Image (cartoon, rainbow, N blue to C red):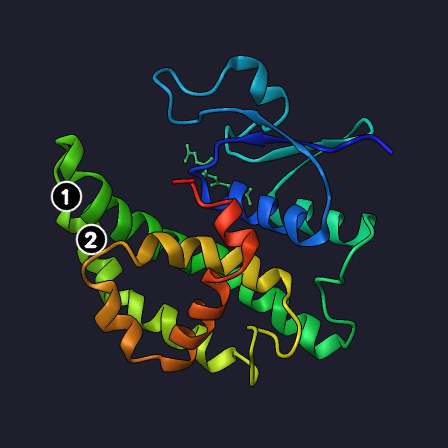
Amino acid sequence: MQKPTLFGADYSVYVRAARLTLFEKGVDYELVPVDVFAAGGPPATYLERQPFGRIPSFEHDGFALYETGAITRYVDEGFEGPDLQPGDPRARARMNQIISIADGYLYSTLVWGIYVEQVSKPPSGRQTDIAKLQPALDRAPTCLRAISDLMANGPWLCGSALSLADLHVAPMIDYFLKAPVASDMMAGNPAVVAWWERMADRPSMRATDPKS
Ligand SMILES: N[C@@H](CCC(=O)N[C@@H](CS)C(=O)NCC(=O)O)C(=O)O
C-alpha cells in the first residue's frame, strides 16, 4: 500500500485534524505544502484537488479525497490501528454530532471570530473587526457549553476511547486558547478544561503543533 499524501499547511486547524488522525492511527504520510493564504491564493492546479480552494486534500493509491470529515473517516476505516470511531450507534452519532458542531459553529466562532480578530490580526497591523468579534464573543459560551453538555463521562469527548470528535475539536480549542478571553470562558466548563489538559498532553498534539 502506498503512503498517503496530505496537501495543506500546518497552521490549518483542518489539516491538523487530518494529521492528528494519521498520527493516532500510526499511518506514515507525506505532507505536501499548500498555502491557501498566500498572495494570489493557492496554486491554480490545487483547485483540481479541492475546487473550493480549502485545505486539506488527500490522496491514497490514486484515490483523491477532500473534506476533512471524509478524510479522517477514510483513514480510520482504511488503515490498521486503534479504532477512532465508536461501534455503538448512539456513541457514533454523538461523535458525528460533535464534529458537525465543530464545523458549523466552533470554527467560525472560536477560530475566525475570536482568534483571528483578537489575536492574529493586531500584530500584523490589521484592525480587529468588532462586527465579527462581538457576535463570536456572544456565541462562544454556547459553543463551549454544547461540547461540555454532550461529553460523555470522559476521559475523551465520546467516553473511554479517543475518537475523531477529539481530533476535530482540539485544533480549534488550541487557537481559541491563545485569546485573552478564553481562560475565563473555559473556566465555566471544567469538564472541557480537564479534557483539554489530557488532549494537549498527547504526543499527536505535540507532533502537529504548528509552532513545532
Ligand atoms: N469543509 C472543509 C473546510 C476546510 C477549511 O476551511 N480549511 C481552511 C484552513 S483551516 C481553509 O482552507 N481556508 C481557506 C479560505 O478560507 O480561503 C473541510 O472540512 O476540509
Which residue sits at x=38%, y=77%?
A: 145
Numbered label attached to residue 197: none
Left or right: residue 10 versus residue 49 is left
Of all residues, the one furthest to the bottom in this rendering is 153
Quadrant containing the N terminus in the rendered view: top right
**Nearer the N terminus, badge 2 or badge 1?**
1
Tell whether label 1 touches label 2 (CB within 8 Å): yes
Disc 1 designates what residue? Answer: 128
Secondary element at tag 2: helix
Which residue sits at x=50%, y=15%?
A: 43
Of all residues, the one furthest to the right in this rendering is 1
Image location (x, y in percent) of residue 206: 49, 50
Q: Residues within 10 Å of mark 1 (few under 14, many from 20)?
A: some
Image location (x, y in percent) of residue 5: 68, 30
Which amino acid type is shown beneath numbered disc 1?
Thr
Q: Is residue 7 above or below residue 206?
A: above
Left or right: residue 5 versus residue 188 is right
Closest to the observer, 94 or 186: 186
Left or right: residue 174 versus residue 70 is left
Q: Residue 163 appears in which quarter of the rendering?
A: bottom right
Q: Is residue 84 above or below residue 152?
A: above
Which amino acid type is shown beneath numbered disc 2?
Leu
Image location (x, y in percent) of residue 194: 42, 76
Disc 2 designates what residue? Answer: 133
Q: Is residue 3 above or below residue 164?
A: above
